[in-house]
Image (cartoon, rainbow, N blue to C red):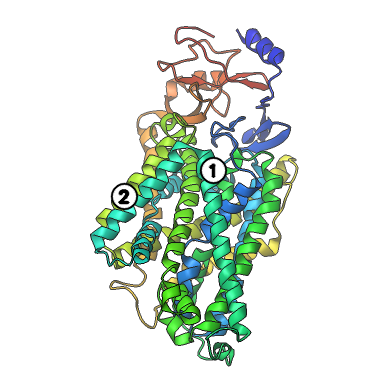
Amino acid sequence: MAAYIKDWFVSNNSKDFVDASVVKENNSRIGEQVVVDGVRIYQDANGAPVETVSPLGYHVGWAGVLFLNVSQMVGTGVFSTPGNIMRALDSVGLSLLYWVFGAIIASAGLAVFLEYGSLFPNRSGGQVTYLEQAYPRPAFLFPTAYAFFTVAFSFSASNSVVLARYIYRAAGYTATEWENKGLAVASYAFLAVICLLSTRWSMRLMNLISAVKLIILLFIVFTGFAVLGGGTRVKDPRQNFRNSFEGVTTNGNDIVNALVSINFAYTGYDNAFNVVAEIHNPFPTLKRVAPISLLIVSILYVLANVAYFAAIPANEIRESGELTAALFFEAVFGGKAAKGLPALIAVSAAGNIMAVIIGSTRRIRECARQGLVPWPHVWASTKPFGTPFAPTLLKWALTTIVILALPFGDAFNFLVDLRSYPDSVFLFMMVVGVYAIRWRRKKAGLPPAQFQAWHSALIFSALVCLLILIMPWYPPDEADVSFWYGTYCATGIGLMVGMAAYYYFWIKLLPKLKGQTIRTETLVLDQDGSVTHRLRKVPNAELAEWDRTHDDAGNLLADVATGTAVEGNQHLIHRLKVKDSTVEESFPADQKV
């Protein structure tokens, strides 16, 4: 049978040839060597298996990369965040510099993602994949922790609520809280259905909305130039730029809160890394287009804020909340002109939601393909529409629950802040992981990455993450929530500790008590060709036989296997390995190999 499979493989001259040899160091596996379309990848075998052909298709081109990043970065933040930053820093000059700092911070983070993207150019999922590969030991620890936070916090409630509020404001209707909730749920459901039915059309719609966003920002920027030139009704456009650094805050908590707001505004510069496997020739495209998307947004952010400060007194911006852009239009064009702004911001929020759905559903799917989510074949499947069906439904369900269950106010904002805290932890671990991967590859004699982040960028990213993690513990001058200011930080740390305890119980203690050992098993869904891992608790008495008949990545060794290739499920089949080649072949349930 093994000879038959090998002959079949050679005669078909498959373009999806995979060399699944294993690189070993001191008799310890450090990576699985995979060649996909001429690109050589070395990844730890415990990681989710590489899909040689994307079951989600290839609908992401250079425009998709550009607008996936732009659309997530440009949500509602640039229209509302300036007020929060001004209130925290109390300085026009420093507020403007913070937008430049945000661009520098995002650029350093992008360099980190580019190095990982060059190492694993056929793996979607972004941080999910990169943490999995950076920390293969202890096995499944980081993937387990990340899977929990990815699944549990995979809601987009805040943007949905903002979308609903601006739709009502555009219609001139004063809505109750439950009317806002109802429209938020309905709006998110509509956008989720589009993403569920077609990746191609959801990408096209998102690209269109993203182009509209850029036009809105360009209009604000050019209007700002007109204000500074004295061509509008604003009488003193330079009033905020005189002595602009007076009154700078010295409170550490306020400084970091402003930094968190800036990071939030730039969140999304890495969104395209979530869909890497859906891009033809992915790394060269990412290396070229991702920096362009960040550069465009950075320039527009800085110039838009200059426009705001040229038209609006600093004290009004400080108290503007989410209405900074509305005050700008009122100051320049009058109250009637500003009435059309909410509709534009609603469009921007809708594009942001779509970009988040597209990116985060891929992260959930990758968590499942690592075998760490129950029924991984369900989450990995792209049936029936060629989209991540189950992850999209999960995001819709969690978003709906959060919107309906939590009252607007402190509790709602707390959950949003809580989600941001582990993000800094994971980015810090990614930076450290870069050095870990470099060291392991060098020790094993593997070639360096196609792109290597500069040491200055890595160190800078790590220091910013530490600042964001540490400084929120410093007491603010004035608390803006009804509970202890450090509650979300303490809760975030508590959740991570809880995940470590859960990992130890599930992966270490429980199998040990039952006389079992965790092994990964590679499965192929014959419905759409999706490939996933499944964790198997193998009795220690059967462990030697399992290791004899499976390689380190969980592929069934067809030349030595004596059991059935399909174990009780017509849709789950082992990936069969023949010498240095991997072949995905479906067999009847009763056929022996």
Image location (x, y in percent) of residue 483: 29, 71
Image location (x, y in percent) of residue 40: 71, 35
* Residue 156 horizontal side relative to residue 286, left or right: left
Give residue 345's quadrant in the image.
bottom left
Q: Residues within 10 Å of mark 1 (few under 14, many from 20)?
A: few
Give residue 376's quadrant in the image.
top left
Label of residue 137 in the image: 1
**The one of 225 and 114 positioned closer to us in this rendering:** 225
Residue at left offset 61%, top offset 73%: 222
Give residue 303's quadrant in the image.
bottom right
Quarter of the figure with the N terminus: top right
For numbered disc 2, what is the local secondary structure? Answer: helix
**Position of 80 relative to 586 (above/below):** below
What amino acid type should be assigned to the residue bearing mark 2? Thr
Residue at left offset 71%, top offset 12%: 11
Q: Of label 1 and label 2, which has the lower sequence position? A: 1
Residue 139 shows in this picture? no
For numbered disc 1, what is the local secondary structure? Answer: loop
- Mark pair 1, 2: CA separation: 36 Å
What amino acid type should be assigned to the residue bearing mark 1? Arg
Circle 2 is placed at which residue position?
400
Residue at left offset 40%, top offset 79%: 476
**The one of 77 and 103 positioned closer to us in this rendering:** 77
Residue 299 shows in this picture? yes
